[in-house]
């Protein structure tokens, strides 16, 4: 039974009881006919008002069902409307190959959102944005575990997205979020290049480890990955040279497996210590 149906039945039942009570009280207290009419009219007006509220509620629901963007904030509505207008304009450029490619990628968004709604894995195109969203959702006491192949200093110090990602790591670690990061290095040259980055992260309350690929005994299942077990979310990078295409997963079995892989990789890693590496 819907809320509207229940409310209408309640008003109807209450109305019957109210009318019976009105006539009973009028006989008991010897109320005049005019007084009884005023009481009944007052209840009738209250019923009309209740129906008016129900009608407005139904209209609002129908409008939101027809125009789902109404449920969004004004800022989000403006962004979506602008996107639709752009899409319509670009659809008219039938001879523009670059536009066709952009539209083809845009049309995949619908499939991506459907996958996310069902809790399935999906492809995302910005590793920094994905990690930043997860970091932003974590609360003090929760953890973020990363097996990282970002072993070039520019991954942490170049560009707005990269530097903001670095600063967000430090802010969240300071708030009490436990960030553990294992850097997967190829050789000693990588260690030399990354020493400054690892020292900075270690000084900013991040548990930093490093390990050489050769010592992992082929345990590394992906180029890199990051997980939060508390949020049941994981980011997987399948290739070292393809940071712009990652898999987002909320599959509990995969996240549990990645947590087990991370613990095993960490056991074979070296804890980075600033004093030790000075």
Image (spheres, rainbow, N blue to C red):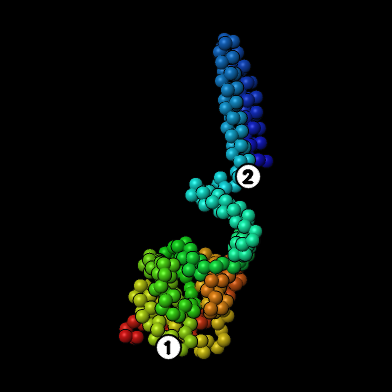
Q: Nearer the viewer, residue 261 or 150?
A: 150
Quick check: 2 above or below 181? above
Residue at 51 percent of width and 69 percent of height: 127
Q: Position of residue 204 (x, y in %)?
A: 35, 72
**Quarter of the image that includes the C terminus:** bottom left
Q: Which residue is mark 1?
A: 189
Front residue of 42 and 192: 192
Asked if the residues shown at circle 1 and circle 2 are in contact, with their CB atoms under 8 angstroms apart, the answer is no
Q: Quadrant of residue 54?
A: top right
- In the picture, residue 11 is in which quadrant? top right
Depicted 21 relative to depicted 268: above or below: above
Residue 269 in the image: x percent, y percent? 46, 84
Residue drawn 55% across the image and 88% down it: 217
Does dot 1 land on a helix, a strand or a loop?
helix
Question: What residue do we see at 38% from left, 66% from top?
Answer: 171
Seen as rendered, the residue at the extreme right is: 1
Residue 65: which numbered mark, if any?
2
Mark 1 to mark 2 CA distance (whole Å): 59 Å
Q: In which quadrant will I find the N terminus? A: top right
């Amino acid at each position: 039974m819907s809320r509207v149906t229940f409310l209408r039945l309640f008003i109807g039942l209450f109305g019957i009881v109210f009318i019976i009570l009105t006539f009973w009280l009028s006989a008991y207290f010897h109320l005049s006919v005019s007084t009884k009419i005023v009481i009944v009219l007052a209840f009738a007006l209250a019923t009309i008002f209740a129906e008016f509220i129900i009608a407005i509620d139904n209209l609002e629901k129908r409008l939101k069902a027809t125009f789902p963007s109404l449920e969004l904030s004004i800022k989000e509505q403006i962004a979506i409307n602008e996107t639709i207008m752009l899409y319509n304009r670009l659809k008219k450029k039938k001879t523009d190959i670059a536009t066709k490619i952009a539209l083809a990628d845009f049309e995949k968004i619908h499939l991506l959102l459907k996958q996310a709604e069902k809790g399935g894995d999906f492809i995302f195109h910005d590793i920094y944005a994905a990690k930043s969203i997860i970091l932003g959702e974590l609360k003090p006491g929760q953890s973020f575990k990363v097996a990282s192949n970002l072993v070039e200093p520019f991954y942490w110090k170049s560009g707005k997205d990269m530097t903001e990602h670095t600063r967000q790591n430090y802010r969240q670690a300071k708030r009490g979020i436990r960030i553990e990061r294992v850097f997967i290095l190829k050789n000693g040259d990588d260690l030399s290049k990354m020493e400054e980055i690892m020292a900075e992260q270690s000084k900013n309350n991040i548990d930093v480890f490093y390990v050489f690929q050769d010592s992992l005994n082929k345990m590394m299942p992906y180029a890199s990955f990051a997980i939060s077990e508390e949020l049941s979310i994981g980011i997987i990078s399948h290739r070292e040279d393809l940071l712009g295409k990652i898999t987002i997963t909320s599959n509990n079995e995969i996240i549990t497996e990645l947590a087990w892989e991370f613990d095993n990789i960490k056991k074979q890693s070296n804890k980075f210590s600033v004093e030790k590496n000075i």
